[in-house]
Image (tube, rainbow, N blue to C red):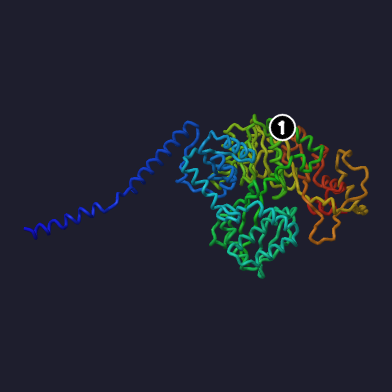
């Protein structure tokens, strides 16, 4: 009995004390209580979002975009209890914890002034703390991922200051390529981009050759050699740029196009990247789309005062069409954007369709072509149904787009668009070739323009010289067909040209436009009905008394804005 009792009691006795020795486990209960509190906090944020007319967001379900986070300085974000967590072009999604915080209202106003369209999301305390904690992850060094190349403002300013000449850029690149650090390729790309900004380049070219890859910069419309990378460095740059541009790294035998953005101070600069295969590797071209370059007034483009005065009236018509023509890179988009900014007003609805949207304009609805899904023609049909006052079509490429644009101009809209022709007179035969009816030109098209860009002489390094006898005869012949002789200078004796001994200095700085325009009137409308050739149209329109591009260029050369040789390289001048 005792043995049995002992045997049975021992396990019971052991179990009793084992249970008593275990401490009370509160971890599970604490976790459950925390989860309940978090759910209650998220529920409260959801209810308050509806109260404040905002959208609710739970940032635990969202990635925080570092590029977006950089838009708002950390100190301002913490003060306003807000943080940017997503960014698409100029659309900024921001998390807001307390909409009644005065600092938030001030910050929202400041962001709008910087050109951002803000979409606010009400979030819980946990969400805003998660977003704000990400500031500790940000570094002043370059961040690179698909679509983003963020560069600290002070880094960009320093590199730009060091690379004001091509020789200085070469020295900076020598130092960067000699480095052994892990971020060497990022450093090289930093120097290339900063140097391009400092030298006012519009494009960066990387052209592989047997001995390496040649870096060339397009400055004032002219390519200039800047550096030669060794093959290994070029391949590393190729991969980095492909990653940024969002194109496939393993494809090198066919063309690819991509884009990414660079943070430059408070502005965002879009970069279009193009890759095409070649014998020694892929040729890369990066086009820098700096919004500052298109913020010039239409009065600063170089349009002659007589033409400018007429255009100021024409662009304010309630219906009609203005077409500007010229080759790629002749400034057509800049001209149209300057007109749109001039006529934009709260009571006017402006919609654009572009391929792609290169620059973003405040207060204007901009749409983008997307392959066969959303073409110029399809987009134009949809835009007309949106009841706009003004429509801008990036380019008229086919007959369907031309017909719809003409119909829009005939039905109470003013249409801006571009064409690829040699001169203003070539606008009408080109439209006819696309299938447009010449009988509609007189009622629809009010202005056809053409333009080119020429380099401006650096006022600090230019000199005046007398015209040669041949040049005087050529100038006289240029102005021979000008109906308004009051536009011809009284003295035609001298012109200006570059005067520099520095091989790194071209003697030019910046560019200016050469313009010509033909305005529709009853006589011209009747003349166009039979679809005459462009040289006859030019001759017929010359009696309107406006300058041709050649005449405009010669006037600018005589006044010292540009050189005669620069004009001759851009437009056709008569041979003597």
Residue at (84% x, 46% y) in the render: 556
What is the residue that sits farthest to the front in this orientation? 2
The quadrant in which residue 40 appears is top left
- Count of marks, rendered view: 1
Residues packed near mark 1 inside 10 Å, few (<14), some (14 to 19) or many (20 plus) = some
Q: Position of residue 41 (x, y in %)?
A: 43, 39
Q: Can residue 439 be seen in this view?
A: no
Quarter of the figure with the C terminus? bottom right
Residue at (76% x, 43% y) in the render: 301
Quarter of the figure with the N terminus? bottom left
Residue 419 shown left or right of residue 27 in the figure: right
Callout 1 secondary element: loop
Q: Nearer the viewer, residue 467 or 85?
A: 85
Q: Nearer the viewer, residue 23 or 261?
A: 23
Residue 499 shown left or right of residue 532 in the figure: right
Above or below, comparing residue 225 to residue 103 in the picture = below
Q: Where is residue 406 in the image (x, y as percent from the top left)?
A: 65, 36
Q: Position of residue 414 (x, y in %)?
A: 67, 34
Q: Nearer the viewer, residue 539 or 254?
A: 254
What is the residue that sits farthest to the bottom in this orientation? 211
Above or below, comparing residue 353 to residue 461 in the picture = above
Above or below, comparing residue 227 to residue 495 in the picture = below
Q: Give the residue at mark 1.
A: 316
Q: Is residue 40 visible?
A: yes
Residue at (83% x, 45% y) in the render: 551
The quadrant in which residue 101 appears is top right
Q: Position of residue 569 (x, y in %)?
A: 80, 54
């Amino acid at each position: 009995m005792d043995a049995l009792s002992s045997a049975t009691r021992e396990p019971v006795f052991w179990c009793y004390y084992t249970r008593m020795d275990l401490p009370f486990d509160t971890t599970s209960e604490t976790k459950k209580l925390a989860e309940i509190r978090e759910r209650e906090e998220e529920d409260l944020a959801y209810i308050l979002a509806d109260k404040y007319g905002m959208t609710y967001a739970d940032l635990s379900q969202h990635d925080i975009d570092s590029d977006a986070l950089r838009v708002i300085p950390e100190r301002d974000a913490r003060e306003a209890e807000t943080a940017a967590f997503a960014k698409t072009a100029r659309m900024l999604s921001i998390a807001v914890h307390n909409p009644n915080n005065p600092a938030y209202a001030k910050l929202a106003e400041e962001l709008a002034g910087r050109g951002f369209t803000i979409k606010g999301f009400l979030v819980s305390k946990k969400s805003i703390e998660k977003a704000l904690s990400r500031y500790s992850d940000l570094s002043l060094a370059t961040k690179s991922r698909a679509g983003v190349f963020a560069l600290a403002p002070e880094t960009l300013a320093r590199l730009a200051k060091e690379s004001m000449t091509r020789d200085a850029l070469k020295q900076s690149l020598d130092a960067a390529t000699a480095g052994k650090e892990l971020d060497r390729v990022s450093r090289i790309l930093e120097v290339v981009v900063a140097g391009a900004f400092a030298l006012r380049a519009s494009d960066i070219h990387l052209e592989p050759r047997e001995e390496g890859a040649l870096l060339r910069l397009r400055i004032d419309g002219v390519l200039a050699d800047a550096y030669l990378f060794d093959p290994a460095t070029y391949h590393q740059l190729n991969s980095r740029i492909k990653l940024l541009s969002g194109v496939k790294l393993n494809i090198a035998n066919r063309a690819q196009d991509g884009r990414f953005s660079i943070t430059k101070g408070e502005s965002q600069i879009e970069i279009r990247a193009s890759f095409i295969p070649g014998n020694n590797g892929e040729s890369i071209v990066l086009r820098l789309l700096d919004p500052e370059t298109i913020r010039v007034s239409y009065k600063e483009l170089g349009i002659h005062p007589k033409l400018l005065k007429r255009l100021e009236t024409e662009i304010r018509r309630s219906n009609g069409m203005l077409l500007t023509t010229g080759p790629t890179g002749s400034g057509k988009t800049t001209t149209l954007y300057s007109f749109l900014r001039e006529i934009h007003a709260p009571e006017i609805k402006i919609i654009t369709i572009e391929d792609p949207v290169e620059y973003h304009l405040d207060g204007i609805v901009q749409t983008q072509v997307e392959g066969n899904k959303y073409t110029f023609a399809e987009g134009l049909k949809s835009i007309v149904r949106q009841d706009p006052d003004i429509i801008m079509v990036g380019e008229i490429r086919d007959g369907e787009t031309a017909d719809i644009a003409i119909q829009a101009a005939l039905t109470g809209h003013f249409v801006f668009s571009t064409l690829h022709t040699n001169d203003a007179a070539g606008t009408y035969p080109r439209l006819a070739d696309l299938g447009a009816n010449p009988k509609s030109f007189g009622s629809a098209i009010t202005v056809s323009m053409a333009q080119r860009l020429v380099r401006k002489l650096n006022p600090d390094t230019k000199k005046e010289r007398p015209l040669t006898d041949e040049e005087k005869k050529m100038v006289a012949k240029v102005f021979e067909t000008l109906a308004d002789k009051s536009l011809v200078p009284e003295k035609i004796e001298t012109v200006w040209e570059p005067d520099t001994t520095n091989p790194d200095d071209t003697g030019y700085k910046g560019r200016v436009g050469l313009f010509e325009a033909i305005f529709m009137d009853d006589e011209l409308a009747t003349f166009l009905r039979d679809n005459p050739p462009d040289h006859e149209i030019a001759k017929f329109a010359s009696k309107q008394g406006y300058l041709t591009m050649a005449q405009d260029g010669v006037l600018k050369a005589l006044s010292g804005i540009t050189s005669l040789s620069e004009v001759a390289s851009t437009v056709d001048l008569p041979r003597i």
